[in-house]
Amino acid sequence: MARSSRSFDESDVRVRPGKGSRPRTKDRPSHKNAKFGMVITKDRGRWGVALDDGPVVVAMRAREMGRTAVEVGDRVGVVGDTSGREGTLARIVRLEDRTSVLRRTADDTDPYERIVVANADQMLIVTAVADPPPRSGFVERALIAAFVGNVRPILCLTKTDLTDPSPFAAEFADLDVPVVNAGVDDTLDAVHAIIDGQITAFIGHSGVGKSTLVNRLIPDAHRETGEVSAVGKGRHTSTQSVALRLPEDAGWLIDTPGIRSFGLAHVDADTVIGVFGDLAEATRECPRGCTHLGPPADPECGLDDPRLIAPDSASARRRDAVRKLLVALRSNVDWES
């Protein structure tokens, strides 16, 4: 016999709790069994991770990571299937603190910062001295990004068989930036002496010979190379950053996509000056709003006070070199000059 609706009471009704009634907690799994390694590739929600004591695994970002950015060069902890077998998928559950971050923006008005690479020890700025002609504006901006990102910059000159690289290298001598030649007629001993045992990010315009250099250093890398176009700009032969292990486990080389501009919307003059201790000390005497560019714009800039920076000293030469960087920082017109 069916029961009438009037015979039901609250004991007969099962209420499913809504989302708002679920207990919330900030507790997260400790993942004490996580294995650590370095991110070597990134592509559409999948990351390749070279484990410290094992193979390269493909991993996704765990749900508890939310939208945490994970970039090539990052140190991460992974759990799940870490065998590295084809078709397996691990999970990234932890991101370690970064020791350095190389950033750029699309242009000087774009507030969105793009991480080029994380945790690099140094950056090799690959520049051709001819075909295409060297672009000091790009190099200066790359130097700024390296200085403020806690990455040691190195200038690497290619196509040295076409012209003398010394005049261009001399433009950066007062910044104490190491310079190495890597033309087709140059041995790579000097390059190896700098990059072996390190994590080195390679950056450069398309067409300057960066991929050719990578293939010389790592013969089985098979990085695509391209010719320089009639207008002096190379084809973009790399579309994603990738970390490549140097032969005999001598270190890591991170090949980045060829780029034509280095936006620095996230950097200001004080940040650049702050990298150099002697100059930062001198600017404490500057009036508010000083751009540190010197007369006539800043007649009272502390960098021009002979009591703080002696004329003809190493600090004075460094001041002049850094001011060239500040001019490049303020200019958003001719990045490729």
Image: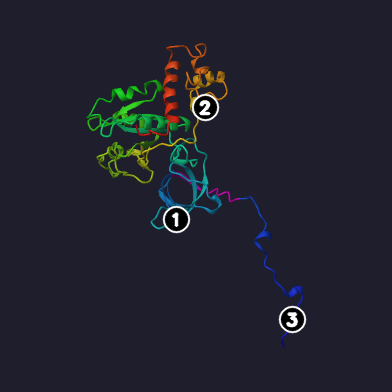
**Residue assigned mark 2:** 270
Magenta range is 28-38
The residue that label 1 is drawn on is: 89
Identity of the amino acid at label 1? Leu
1 or 311: which is nearer to us? 311
Q: Nearer the viewer, mark 3 or mark 1?
A: 3
Residue 213 position in % (x across, y down) = 29, 37
Amino acid carrying mark 3 in the image? Ser
Figure check: 255 above or below 285? below
Q: Residue furthest bottom?
A: 1
Q: Tell me if mark 3 has few (under 14), some (14-19) or many (20+) residues whose alpha carbon lies within 10 angstroms of its own.
A: few
Q: Earlier in the sequence, mark 3 or mark 1?
A: 3
Tell me the crowding category of disc 1: few under 14, some 14 to 19, or many 20 or more residues within 10 angstroms, Cα based.
some
Q: Name the residue beneath numbered marker 3.
A: 5
Q: Position of residue 312 (x, y in %)?
A: 42, 12
Between the residue at mark 3 and the residue at mark 1, the CA separation in whole angstroms equals 53 Å
Q: CA distance from mark 1 to mark 2?
A: 45 Å
- Res 130 seen here: yes
Q: Is residue 196 visible?
A: no
Q: Which of the two labelled residues, at mark 3 and mark 2, occupies the earlier sequence position?
A: 3
Q: CA distance from mark 3 to mark 2?
A: 77 Å
- Secondary structure at badge 2 equals helix
User: Disc 3 on helix, strand or loop?
Assistant: helix
Q: Secondary structure at mark 1?
A: loop
